[in-house]
Image (cartoon, rainbow, N blue to C red):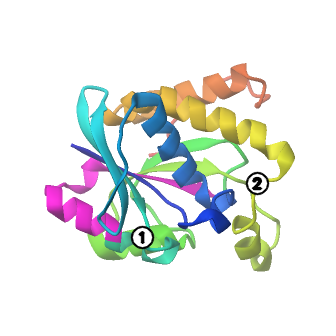
Amino acid sequence: MLLLVGLGNPGSRYAGNRHNIGFMAVDAIAKRHGIVPWRRRFQGVSAEGPLGGERALLLLPGTYMNESGRAVAEAAHFYKLGLPDIVVVHDEIDLAPGKVRLKTGGGVAGHNGLRSISAHIGNDYRRVRIGVGHPGLKQLVESYVLNDFAKDERPWVEALCAIIADNAELLAKGQDASFQNKVHLAMQAKGFFLSKEPEGSDE
């Protein structure tokens, strides 16, 4: 079974924030693959269904970002899942907007959601890192990620969430490098990137 977690903050106030792109991507996966209904469970909302021939539980923690680990740990323990069965989708300020990287383990790079998850279950879970760009100064990061995507960013956000949803079966099958390359190539085909080569996984 795959536990696919989108990170974000609950409530309409935060719905369009850069910090909530994990929520957006996992919601797109649910819609694309007909994984319904969402139910209140595991200190958030979850939906269960087939994905790439695997059983998948999609989870959006309702604990606010810095307590995400509570929800993830509860779901993981309930289903007796190991860290390789857990994929966390989150915003990444150290990647250019629209870039996607897959990795297993590693540091949390100041991300409070990842810090909470690692504290509760350990560090070696899989991560889908979605670039949202950096404001340039460390002291601006919090307000930057807690603000909505700008109007001119929305086309790539919507395109990327749709492309992630289209290729989510590869995540369920553990084909992380293929997922990353297909997402990159699809974004490039839509004109969002200038580089011509798919980029390898940094796992």
Which residue type carries mark 1? Ser
Please tell me which residue is depicted at 55% across the width and 70% down the height of the picture: 111
Residue wearing tag 1: 68
Along the horizontal axis of the image, is 54 left or right of 183?
A: left
Nearer to me, 28 or 201? 28
Which residue type carries mark 2? Phe
Disc 1 element: helix
Nearer to me, 46 or 70? 46
Res 198 seen here = no
Name the spot of residue 79 as percent of width and height, x first.
Answer: 16, 55
Please tell me which residue is depicted at 25% across the width and 26% down the height of the picture: 53
Task: Check contact, mark 1 vs mark 2: CB within 8 A.
Answer: no
| Quarter-of-image position of residue 93 | bottom right
Please tell me which residue is depicted at 53% across the width and 55% down the height of the picture: 90
Circle 1 packing at 10 Å, graded few (<14), some (14-19), many (20+), is many
Disc 2 element: loop
Nearer to me, 199 or 74? 74
First in residue order: circle 1 vs circle 2 = 1
Please tell me which residue is depicted at 50% across the width and 26% down the height of the picture: 166
Residue wearing tag 2: 149
Name the spot of residue 69 as percent of width and height, x first.
Answer: 36, 71
Circle 2 packing at 10 Å, graded few (<14), some (14-19), many (20+), is some
Along the horizontal axis of the image, is 157 left or right of 181?
A: right
Name the spot of residue 116 as percent of width and height, x first.
Answer: 41, 75
Find the magenta span and give its range. 71-92
